[in-house]
Image: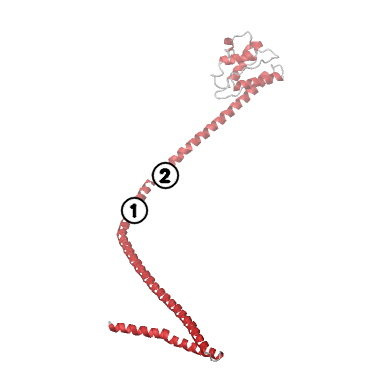
């Protein structure tokens, strides 16, 4: 222990002599030469030499002291920086080691979980494959009934279309038949009544009244003037031939026909009661206008 202490003290003395002793001798030597130079300039004045020696030594000593202080400070900072770098590196290495150990633990846990999950996944895949095969078999078995159902649905969807189409066709047929019937009636009226109507204007009035009566069985006609007398029998035959082709007998009843005749030809029918007029087919082959009974399901006249 004493030997170590002595060695330490000797080392300190050596360092002190090296740092301050040798430089001090150099400073004093330089100061001596400077003072001799200045004293020579002042005529070998000892006071000048002494003052120059003191000032020179003080200045050089101060400069050297400052240099040593700066050098020591720089050395101390360099040592502290190296020490901190060593500590930081040690901490980083410790963190790296910790992270490596943590990663290793995580990897081991993942491997363990994977080892546990893989068998379960394989079992689930096998179960799913079996279910898919069963579903495929069921779908293939039910494919044919599904096709039959689709055909049935398609047929059902076509039926309303066919129904609506047929209804429209029937309506067009009825409208066309109605128009053809009215055209036939207009031809019959023109052919039959032209010789007995007062003039062409009266004929147009008669045609218009018949056309409106065909559209509305309650239509009230205007009186028609005749230039040649027709009997009540002729007029009854005339109106019956027309009404018989207009359709439903629920609308164009005997009473409706009698009222229509009495209002259209008031001069001829003024003395005839409605009950007597309703006997339309009386003496059907007698008179200028005879009964023209239509064929079954037909509307054409036989005057031609």
Residue 282 in percent (x, y) is at 58, 12
**Which colouring convention does the figure follow?**
secondary structure
- Report the quarter where the N terminus lies: bottom left
Residue under circle 2? 147
Q: Position of residue 52 (x, y in %)?
A: 51, 86
Q: Position of residue 42 (x, y in %)?
A: 56, 89
Secondary structure under tag 1 reads: helix
Q: Quick check: 156 left or right of 103?
A: right
Image quarter in which the C terminus is found: top right
Comparing 200 with 57, the one in front is 57
Q: Nearer the viewer, residue 194 or 250?
A: 250
Q: Nearer the viewer, residue 106 or 84?
A: 84
Residue furthest right in the image: 199
Q: Residue at x 63, y 14 (%)?
A: 263
**Do labels 2 and 1 touch, CB within 8 Å?**
no
Q: Quadrant of residue 122?
A: bottom left
Q: CA distance from mark 2 to mark 1?
A: 28 Å
Picture residue at 56% right of the left edge, 28% below the top: 174
| Mark in front: 2 vs 1 | 1
Count residues near mark 1 (Cα–Cα under 10 Å), then give few for <14, some for 14-19, many for 20+: few
- Label 1 sits on residue: 128
Task: Please tell me whether mark 2 sits on a helix, a strand or a loop.
Answer: helix
């Amino acid at each position: 222990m004493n030997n170590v202490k002595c060695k330490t003290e000797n080392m300190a003395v050596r360092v002190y002599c090296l740092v301050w002793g040798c430089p001090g001798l150099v400073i004093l030597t330089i100061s001596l030469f400077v003072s001799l130079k200045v004293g020579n300039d002042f005529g070998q004045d000892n006071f000048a030499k002494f003052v120059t020696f003191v000032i020179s030594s003080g200045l050089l000593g101060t400069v050297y002291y400052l240099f040593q202080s700066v050098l020591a400070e720089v050395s101390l900072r360099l040592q502290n920086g190296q020490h901190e770098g060593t500590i930081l590196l040690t901490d980083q290495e410790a963190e790296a080691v910790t992270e490596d150990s943590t990663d290793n633990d995580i990897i081991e846990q993942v491997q363990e979980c994977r080892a546990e999950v893989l068998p379960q996944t394989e079992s689930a895949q096998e179960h799913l494959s079996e279910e898919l095969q069963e579903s495929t078999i069921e779908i293939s078995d039910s494919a044919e009934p599904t096709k039959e159902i689709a055909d049935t649905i398609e047929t059902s969807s076509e039926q309303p279309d066919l129904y609506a189409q047929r209804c429209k066709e029937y309506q067009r047929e009825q409208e066309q038949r109605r128009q053809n019937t009215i055209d036939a009636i207009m031809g019959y009226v023109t052919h039959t009544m032209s010789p007995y109507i007062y003039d062409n204007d009266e004929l147009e009035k008669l045609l218009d009244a018949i056309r409106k009566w065909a559209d509305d069985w309650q239509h009230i006609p205007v009186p028609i003037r005749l230039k040649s007398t027709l009997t009540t029998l002729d007029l009854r035959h005339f109106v019956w031939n027309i009404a018989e082709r207009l359709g439903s007998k629920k609308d164009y009843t005997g009473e409706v026909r009698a009222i229509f005749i009495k209002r259209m030809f008031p001069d001829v029918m003024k003395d005839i009661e409605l009950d007597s007029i309703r006997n339309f087919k009386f003496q059907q082959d007698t008179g200028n206008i005879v009964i023209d009974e239509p064929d079954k399901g037909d509307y054409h006249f036989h005057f031609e």
